[in-house]
Image (cartoon, rainbow, N blue to C red):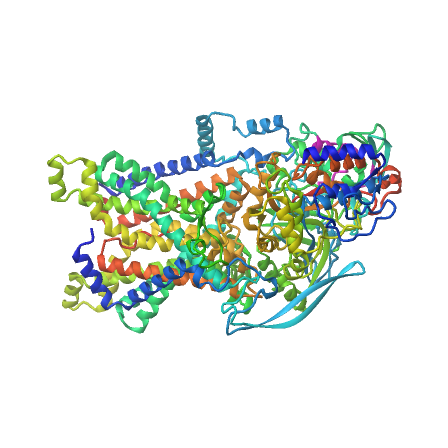
């Protein structure tokens, strides 16, 4: 199978999964007690008014008609109107998306930058203090609830010593970025000051996870015969480690990271709550509490679709690095 | 219960003009005393105080509207449909960069904020707006955002007195009709002038489902109002009501924001919900949904332009986040400083507390037809079981006043002879035995973070009840949205039978607490008692002192009346 | 199922692995605490005494600005005074804002965490393992359909889906009489163990996919084994083959995954409780939520239960690592759905 065909197949699979995501999200409303009308109608609404609202929301149609309407709407970028805010749900959802993406990307950068060196050092200096340090850190990292970590960081770094600002996004990355072109670095500084603690909070679990994977992967690879052979041939140790062993280690690591991306987004939900970060996660929670179905459904679909997209990218990368998986 | 009430009513009829309130207490089977704070007999029409004993002192028949309301409050104290808790304080934190006085009605009027350094002001609330359409919401948090740009016909000063805003005169034309004359020279932010047609349209958009492309959830805030029309040839609008509607001016002092008819009609809902075109002191600069709202001051405002040039309103749900933002100099005013952080705000040097008693009463409803709360002894026992002063001192750091009736002090209809229940666990235990519900297990449903210390209050109440040997109580945390949905769905049996909630009544009139919460047909009722219904019906058919005669005088005293409430 | 070789491997890994020993010690300790909570807790975790609120843990002294207000001449006067609060041995871990004993609450919180972790994992196993086994055994269309469905479930972050489901559904609470209290051994303790039913069901529903994937992998490889082929050619029914051959071979990796999942679900439960979607107030996450508002004035209310979570999850993860290293079920880094 060629790389192109592999990609095509992967994309088609992805579309199928996204359709499944939409269907599950759509059906969610029908396995939830209560009617949306209770949340939309004024408290003293008459029975006729409730009927009228139900009709306006399309709730009186048979299930399959509502389903088809919803699918057609989505294809046109229409997620319906928020029950609470009176705006298009898609505008709300996509308005919140950048904040979450910023946070998730920042956390991933933190994780990748910290974890791979840690894992490598840990594996190559086995049973030395650096290894113990890295192992302890990663054990703590995967065992600590990230919301609690966030609270503790706030307690120490924002409340006790006033190092970081608290509880605001400050400035959007895009705004800060454009300010750079005008020679203004203050926007970037504000952005960094506000995102540091949330990104550390969200990135810690991932840092720890990738450190562990890199360490055990490196240990495996370093014990393999091709490494011994390379060493015997007199290839410099750094080259053996980084050109061969690390590369082979990272391939499976990438896959696991892709699969764990859900954890990252889940973590973002709660990190946003701790740091008052106005992203999709906060939106999901408030939409659940308000039974704002169009916004809730839209948010879940965007999150699910994002996950599928990233995994397609990861798989393509994987197949590119290691063409054997295509077969 | 029902049968007994009927008996009481027949008794009232037989007794002619005098009714023995003690008999009402007596139907509780109360062994002598009653729960009220004082034993003295009320004097004049002011207070009607029950004394102990089955055939106690007879109370005179009420004569004025206020006396009917006071009688209802006394009756409700004795019947204990609630565990009476506290009057909530609005505890704001403010930086020393601004000068500002907190209002009692939970509104923040940015026009009153005077910056001492710089020209901009930032306010941090607990949550953002639910869209900017001034007629499509019910929450104080949204009010605080839209009311910087929109104004009503009448308003209130910081003490709650009615003042003229977009109306420069108002009078009662006949029983069901009042007339507002519309101020000259007022412009919308779009630049166009305010017309009487805009005013009539705004009123009709709220009360008439067919007008303005909206079924407004505020129609009951203008209760009784049926419609409005422009008076031919005059710069005035006539508003008609069902019946006398004694509190109609109060309603317009708290509610009904004026919008521009053409602007509403030419734009779609999503646009109206993300833009503003009012007559107020601040115009919208930028709107980031659920994140922040920025304003600049409106230079052509009909009064002096606002002292602050720019205004930004943001939100942080966690109270600790708000406090830290204030202490860190990131904001100028924060709402709901929790008691435990009050000391930090006060001692900081750059910030201070600005507490003010609000118009919100916090209570635990006990649904009258659900076991074990269908027993009045049991309900009274719950009131005796708690130690309200300790809750106020230890949980709320004194930022609250105890209550013993639905109506707050200073409101029309407040009965000054009725005090809070005393803490008396032994009596509570005895009353539970008498009620026949010994061994009952009850669950108190409470929202979290909605009111100052709500969860802590609920936990303390449940904990203290649980200490009675013959009742066990626990707390269930609820999301406010779902709890409110269950309470508001019009079916008393679907909701929880025991819940904590707060009721804000910016009208300073007992009727707007008792009617929705404690009469048979109330929107949020947990109680039904024919006597209460009767007393309130009587009160509402009589003109109050303010509305009946004092219309032309413009502002009325607190004794005038006003209406407005929200459960948020 | 558990062969002598497995036992040997476990023993071998045990001997030179002090991390495994720490892990087992932690898990055993927490299990004992959870089981004997009514006997160990010095106070009823729910009983409050407002006068003793916010006492610091042993070794700490807290200076607090206590504020009170008075209504004078129509305006509210704020009075602030500085007081020092000392810790007392009566409450070694301090008290919370209601004067409840933190130590007792941490002890009872272990029950909620472990029960939700164990029951949630069990439910996820009961859903995921059969689906995975069937998919892997039959391959083809059944496999495709089931695995695509699993992909759909995987596309939702478990916390996000759990928040949606717990938030949208009614909170069901299961009460089980506490045997110690029923036997009269701890009369002043809460009479019931309160289980957050909706939370348990939901964490099971959002994590079964991991079990399905592992079970499927095992079934795929076992069905190709010679003895399985032989059994089938002798006419054994599919159900028989799955039960007798495929399932036993999958037990090891499923157990290892199950261990890790208990830790993941404890984290998930604490996150849900923190967000206010909790069925019980005796939960570590709930207490952290409570302590959030007291960070500046009573830091221990949020700190102590957080440490308890970390200890419990570290213990379980260490045991999981030990099992994985000893049994080498080939899980790699898969599994886990930590919050």
Q: Quadrant of the N terminus of chain B?
A: top right
Residue C136 lies left or right of residue C205; in this view the side is: left
Q: Give, as a single range, the part of the protein colored magenta.
A: B181-207
Residue nearest the viewer, comparing B376 with A196: B376
Residue C57 lies left or right of residue B281; in this view the side is: left
Report if residue B197 lies within the magenta region.
Answer: yes
Q: Position of residue C163 (x, y in %)?
A: 46, 46
Report if residue A116 lies within the magenta region.
Answer: no
Residue B438 lies left or right of residue B168; in this view the side is: left
Residue nearest the viewer, comparing A285 with A72: A285
How many numbered dots are placed on residues in this image? 0
In this rendering, does residue A152 appear at all? no
Residue nearest the viewer, comparing C206 with B125: C206
In this rendering, does residue B503 appear at all? yes
Q: Quadrant of the C terminus of chain B?
A: top right
Q: Position of residue C264 (x, y in %)?
A: 37, 54
**Quarter of the view holding residue C134:** top left
* Residue at 47% over, 28% down: A66
């Amino acid at each position: 199978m060629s790389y192109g065909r592999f990609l095509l197949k992967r994309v088609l699979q992805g579309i199928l999964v996204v359709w499944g995501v939409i269907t599950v999200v759509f059906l969610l409303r029908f396995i939830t007690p209560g009617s949306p009308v209770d949340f939309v109608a004024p408290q003293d609404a008459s029975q006729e008014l409730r009927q009228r609202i139900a009709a306006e929301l399309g709730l009186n149609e048979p299930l399959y008609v509502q389903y088809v309407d919803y699918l057609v709407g989505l294809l046109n970028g229409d997620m319906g109107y928020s029950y609470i805010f009176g705006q298009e749900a898609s505008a709300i959802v996509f308005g919140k998306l950048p904040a979450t993406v910023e946070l998730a990307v920042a956390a991933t950068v933190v994780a990748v930058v910290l974890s791979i060196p840690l894992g490598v050092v840990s594996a190559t200096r086995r049973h030395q203090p650096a290894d113990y340090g890295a192992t302890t850190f990663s054990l703590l990292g995967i065992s600590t609830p990230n919301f609690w970590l966030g609270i503790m960081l706030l307690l120490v770094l924002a409340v006790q010593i006033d190092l970081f600002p608290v509880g605001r996004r400050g400035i959007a990355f895009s705004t800060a970025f454009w300010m750079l072109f005008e020679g203004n670095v203050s926007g970037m500084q504000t952005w960094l000051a506000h995102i540091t603690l949330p990104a550390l909070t969200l990135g810690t679990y991932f840092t720890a996870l990738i450190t562990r994977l890199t360490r055990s992967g490196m240990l495996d690879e370093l014990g393999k015969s091709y490494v011994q052979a390379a060493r015997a041939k007199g290839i410099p140790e750094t080259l053996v480690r980084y050109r061969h062993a690390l590369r082979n280690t990272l391939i499976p690591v990438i896959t696991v990271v892709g699969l764990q991306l859900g954890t990252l987004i889940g973590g973002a939900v709660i990190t946003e709550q701790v740091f008052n970060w106005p992203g999709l996660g906060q939106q999901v929670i408030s939409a659940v509490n308000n039974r704002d179905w169009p916004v809730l459904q839209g948010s879940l679909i965007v999150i699910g679709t994002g996950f599928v997209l990233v995994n397609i990218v990861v798989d393509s990368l994987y197949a590119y690095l290691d063409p054997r998986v295509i077969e | 219960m029902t049968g007994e009430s009927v008996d009481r009513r027949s008794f009232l009829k037989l007794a002619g003009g005098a009714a023995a309130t003690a008999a009402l207490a007596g139907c509780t089977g109360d062994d002598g005393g009653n729960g009220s704070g004082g034993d003295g007999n009320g004097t004049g029409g002011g207070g009607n105080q029950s004394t102990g004993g089955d055939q106690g002192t007879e109370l005179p028949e009420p004569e004025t509207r206020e006396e009917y309301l006071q009688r209802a409050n006394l009756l409700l104290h004795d019947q204990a449909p609630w565990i009476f808790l506290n009057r909530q304080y609005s505890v704001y934190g403010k930086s020393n960069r601004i000068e500002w006085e907190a209002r009692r009605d939970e509104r923040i009027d940015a026009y009153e904020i005077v910056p001492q350094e710089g020209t901009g002001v930032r306010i941090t609330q607990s949550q953002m707006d639910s869209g900017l359409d001034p007629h499509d919401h019910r929450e104080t948090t949204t009010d605080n955002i839209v009311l910087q740009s929109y104004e009503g016909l009448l308003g209130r000063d910081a003490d709650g007195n009615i003042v003229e805003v977009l109306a420069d005169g108002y009078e009662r034309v006949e029983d069901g009709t009042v007339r507002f004359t519309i101020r000259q020279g007022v412009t919308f932010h779009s630049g166009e002038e305010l017309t009487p047609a805009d005013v009539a349209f705004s009123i009709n958009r709220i009360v008439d489902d067919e007008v303005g492309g909206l079924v407004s959830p505020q129609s009951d805030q203008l209760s009784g109002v049926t419609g409005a029309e422009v008076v031919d040839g005059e710069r005035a609008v006539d508003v008609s009501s069902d019946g006398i509607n004694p509190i109609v001016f109060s309603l317009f002092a708290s509610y009904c924001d004026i919008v521009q008819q053409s602007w509403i009609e030419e734009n779609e809902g999503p646009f109206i919900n993300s833009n503003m075109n009012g007559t107020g002191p601040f115009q919208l600069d930028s709107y980031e949904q659920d994140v922040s709202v920025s304003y600049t001051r409106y230079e052509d405002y009909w009064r002096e332009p606002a002292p602050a040039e720019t205004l930004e309103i943001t939100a942080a749900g966690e109270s600790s986040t708000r406090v830290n933002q204030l202490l860190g100099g990131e904001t100028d005013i924060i709402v709901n400083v929790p008691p435990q952080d009050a000391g930090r705000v006060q001692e900081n040097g750059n910030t201070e507390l600005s507490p003010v008693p609000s118009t919100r009463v916090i209570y635990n409803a006990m649904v009258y037809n659900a076991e074990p709360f269908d027993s009045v002894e049991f309900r009274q026992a719950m009131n005796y079981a708690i130690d309200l002063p300790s809750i106020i001192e230890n949980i709320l750091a004194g930022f609250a006043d105890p209550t013993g009736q639905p109506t707050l002090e200073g409101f029309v209809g407040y009965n000054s002879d009725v005090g809070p229940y005393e803490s008396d666990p032994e009596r509570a235990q005895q009353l539970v035995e008498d009620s026949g519900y010994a061994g009952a297990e009850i669950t108190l449903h409470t929202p979290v973070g909605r009111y100052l210390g709500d969860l802590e209050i609920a936990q303390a109440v449940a904990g203290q009840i649980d200490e009675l040997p013959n009742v066990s109580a626990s707390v269930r945390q609820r999301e406010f949205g779902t709890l409110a949905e269950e309470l508001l769905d019009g079916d008393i049996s679907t909701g929880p039978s025991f819940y904590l909630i707060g009721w804000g009544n910016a009208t300073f009139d007992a009727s707007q607490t008792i009617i929705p919460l404690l009469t048979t047909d109330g929107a949020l009722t947990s109680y039904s008692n024919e006597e209460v219904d009767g007393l309130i019906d009587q009160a509402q058919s009589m003109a109050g002192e303010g509305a009946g005669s004092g219309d032309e005088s413009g502002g009325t005293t607190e004794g005038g009346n006003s209406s407005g409430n929200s459960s948020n | 199922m558990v062969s002598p070789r497995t036992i040997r491997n476990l023993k071998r890994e045990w001997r030179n692995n002090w991390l495994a020993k720490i892990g087992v010690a932690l898990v055993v300790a927490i299990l004992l605490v959870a089981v004997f909570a009514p006997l160990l807790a010095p106070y009823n975790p729910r009983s409050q005494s407002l006068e003793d609120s916010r006492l610091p843990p042993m070794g700490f002294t807290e200076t607090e600005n206590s504020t009170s207000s008075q209504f004078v001449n129509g305006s509210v006067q704020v009075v602030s005074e500085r007081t020092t609060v000392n810790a007392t041995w009566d409450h070694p871990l301090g008290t919370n804002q209601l004067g409840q004993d933190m130590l007792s609450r941490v002890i009872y919180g272990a029950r909620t965490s472990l029960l939700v972790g164990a029951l949630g994992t069990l439910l996820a196993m009961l859903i995921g393992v059969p689906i995975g086994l069937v998919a892997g055994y039959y391959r083809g269309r059944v496999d495709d359909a089931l695995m695509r469905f699993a992909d759909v479930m995987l596309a939702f972050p478990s916390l996000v889906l759990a928040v949606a489901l717990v938030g949208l559904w009614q909170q069901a609470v299961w009460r089980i009489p506490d045997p110690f209290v029923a036997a009269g051994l701890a009369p002043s303790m809460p009479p019931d163990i309160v289980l957050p039913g909706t939370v348990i069901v939901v964490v099971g529903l959002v994590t079964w996919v991991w079990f399905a994937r592992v079970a499927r992998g095992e079934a795929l490889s076992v069905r190709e084994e010679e003895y399985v082929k032989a059994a089938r050619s002798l006419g054994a029914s599919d159900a028989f083959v799955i039960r007798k051959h495929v399932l036993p071979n999958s037990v090891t990796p499923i157990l290892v995954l199950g261990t890790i999942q208990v830790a993941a679900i404890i984290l998930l439960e604490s996150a849900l409780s923190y967000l206010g979607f909790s069925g019980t107030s005796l939960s570590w996450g709930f207490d952290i939520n409570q302590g959030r508002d007291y960070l500046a004035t009573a830091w221990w209310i949020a700190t102590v239960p957080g440490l308890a979570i970390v200890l419990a999850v570290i213990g379980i993860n260490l045991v999981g690592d030990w099992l994985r290293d000893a049994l080498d079920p080939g899980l790699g880094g898969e599994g886990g759905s930590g919050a």
